Image: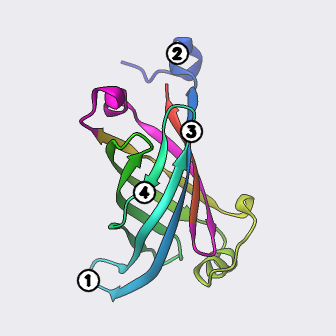
Amino acid sequence: MSAPSFDSLPVELKSVQTRPLFVMRLDVKGPVIIGGTPASFRRVGIVPSGTFAGERLSGTVLDGASDWQTVRSDGSATLDVRLVLKTDDDVLIGMSYKGVRSGPPGVLDQINRGIVVDPGSYYFRINPIFEVASPKYDWLNNVLAIGVGHRLSDGPVYSVFEVL
C-alpha cells in the first residue's frame, strides 16, 4: 500500500471549508502562577466574564471559567479552557478548547506584559467543541470549530469558525 498524495484525493479531502460561528471576547484576570512543576511551568487565567456574537448565536460568558496554560521552554503557551456560554435566549452551552500561542520571544514577552502587539506577528489558534442540552442548539453538539485569537491587554478576542 502506497501513501496517498493530495493530487489523488477527492476534492472534499483537499481543503477545509469553514463558516463563521461567532466572535468572542473574554475578560481575563491573572494569571495565577502555579510555577515550575515536574511537568511544566503552569499558570492559570481566571475568566470572570465575556461576550460572544454571531449570526446563529450570541450572549455572555458566565463567571467561573479558567484557562490552564502550560508555558513551554521557548515561551509559547498551550491553553486548556473550559467555560459556559449563556445565549441571549437563556440557553447554557459548555465550551472547551485547547489552543496554542507562539511567536518570536520578544513578541511573547510583550504579550505577557499586557502589551498589545500586531496579531500578524504571532500564532494564536484554538479548537473549540461544545455541549448543549437544548434542542434549538443541538447542532452545536456535532460541531468542531477552529478559532483565530488575538491577545488584548485584558483578555483575548477570538474569531470562531465552524468546520464544515
Left or right side of 142 for 76: right
Q: Amino acid at mark 2?
A: Glu
Q: Nearer the viewer, mark 1 or mark 4?
A: 4
Q: Nearer the viewer, mark 4 or mark 2?
A: 4
Q: Amino acid at mark 4?
A: Val
> Label 4 vs label 2: CA separation?
35 Å
Which residue is at 55% across, 42% downward?
Answer: 22
Residue 61, label in figure: 4
Q: Amino acid at mark 3?
A: Gly
Left or right side of 44 for 55: right
Question: Foreground: 5 or 65?
Answer: 65
Which residue was labeled with disc 1? 38
**Which class describes the residues within 10 Å of circle 3: few (<14), some (14-19), or many (20+)?**
some
Which residue reaches farthest front? 89
> Label 3 vs label 4: CA separation?
14 Å
> Label 1 vs label 4: CA separation?
33 Å
Q: Amino acid at mark 1?
A: Pro
Left or right side of 129 for 135: left
The answer to whether residue 143 is above or below residue 125 is: above
